[in-house]
Each structure stands twice: as structure tokens, then as C-alpha cells.
Image (cartoon, helix red, strand yellow):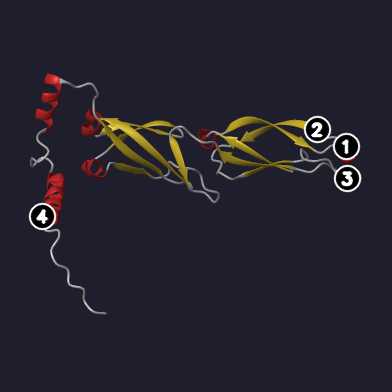
Amino acid sequence: MRVLLEVELEDLARGGRYEIEFEREGAEGGASIRQTEEVHVPPATPPGAVIRLAGRGGPGTGGEPAGDLLVRVEPRKHPLFVVDGFDLELELPLPLPLLLEGRFGVPTLEGEIQVSAGMDFRERLEIVLEGRGLFMPGGGRGRLVVRVIPELPEGLTGEKLAALSELLGRADSEAYPRYRRFRQLAMAKQSGAGGRVTQQPR
């Protein structure tokens, strides 16, 4: 007999105990019976793993012993992490001061860890943490892909907004070379658009 058990993502990593309730056939074709079993999910369980509870399934026939109960373990939907195979994806809102500092906390299945990011991170706004995803059936582990969403302070008006703008500088200044190059290319393409197109014979 097979049943599905949905567990928290964290319990796939650290283990946990769950109580499941299901219906099974009665003995000798009798009325269905509601049955409750406790399932221990061991640490480092891969998604889709099957836990076998010997003798806890449907009744045997003709004096045979009861069958096994096969419990397939799958992760529940998580408020932070998105499952992509054995990888986890996370969108992390990050206030501007922490973004500039380059050191901040990242939640994982085992708890929050501190990450120190370099200049390449500030360009890509993505961090890949190897071995922080879901466990794989044959050993090993997926990745945790963190996509950072810069968060600017809300409610800035008047002098505070002017002070922040002064601190960050003008958008077209040398402090933002990638943006300047992008704008130059965009303007060049726009100014050169149109004209005559000659179709070559095929």
C-alpha cells in the first residue's frame, strides 16, 4: 500500500516525525478502516524517497501477513524557497546599506548563515551556495541560488532624498560605468534607426 507524505523542506535536511492518517481495506474484504501511523523522516532525506513500514499496509489474504506501507516523501510548498530539481532558489530583499557592505545573513535549511560577497556579487546580484540545496539519492547535494533584490528606503522626502541623491551621485556619472555604456549603446541604436533596407535576392 502506498501513501504520500508532504513534509517541511527543513525536515528533509534535519529529520522529523509525522503522523499520517489514511484508509485501508478491512480484512477479508470488510469495511474500510482508518489507520494512523507515525513516520520518522531521517536526516538527509532526498525528495521522492520512499520509507517502508513493514507489516503496516493492507491485510494479507488466506492467512498471509499484512503487507508493507510505502510512504513517499515530498516537500511542501515553502514561503521562502522554490524547489528546482535538487536546487533551491531564494529571492532575498537586501537593504542598500547591507548591499554596499557586502556582508549579510542568508537563510538555509539548517538555519541562517553569514555571507561575505565581493565586487562580482554587486554586479550580478546573485550568490550560488554549493551543497546548500536538497539531498540527492546517491549522495551529494544541490545548490542554493540566492537572487538579491536591492531595497531602497521608503518615505524619503525633501532633504533626506536630496542627501541620498548627493551621496550616490548622478546616474550618468563615472560611478556607474555599466549604466553609462548601456545608455550610450541605446542612444546610438535609436539615432541610427530607420533608413533604407535593400533586400538581397535569394
Residue corresponding to mark 3: 61
The answer to which quarter of the image holds residue 91 is: top left
Residue 142 placement (x, y as % from top left)? 45, 46
Q: Which numbered disc flags the more N-terminal residue, 2 or 4?
A: 2
**Viewer-side residue, 140 vs 104:** 104
For the residues bearing labels 2 and 4, Cβ distance under 8 angstroms: no
Pair 2/4: label in front: 4
For the residues bearing labels 1 and 4, Cβ distance under 8 angstroms: no
Inspect the image, locate mark 4, and give the three-letter code of the amino acid beneath it.
Answer: Ser
**Horizontal relation, residue 111 to residue 72: left or right:** left
For the residues bearing labels 2 and 1, Cβ distance under 8 angstroms: yes
Callout 3: few (<14), some (14-19), or many (20+) C-alpha neighbours within 10 Å? few
Inspect the image, locate mark 2, and give the three-letter code of the amino acid beneath it.
Answer: Ile
Mark-to-mark CA distance, 1 and 3: 12 Å
Inspect the image, locate mark 1, and give the three-letter code of the amino acid beneath it.
Answer: Gly
Q: Which numbered disc flags the more N-terminal residue, 3 or 2?
A: 2
Please tell me whether mark 1 sits on a helix, a strand or a loop.
loop
Residue corresponding to mark 2: 33
Mark-to-mark CA distance, 4 and 3: 83 Å
Q: Which numbered disc flags the more N-terminal residue, 4 or 3?
A: 3
Q: Which numbered disc flags the more N-terminal residue, 1 or 4?
A: 1
Mark-to-mark CA distance, 2 and 4: 77 Å
Residue corresponding to mark 1: 30
The answer to which quarter of the image holds residue 33 is: top right
Residue corresponding to mark 4: 191
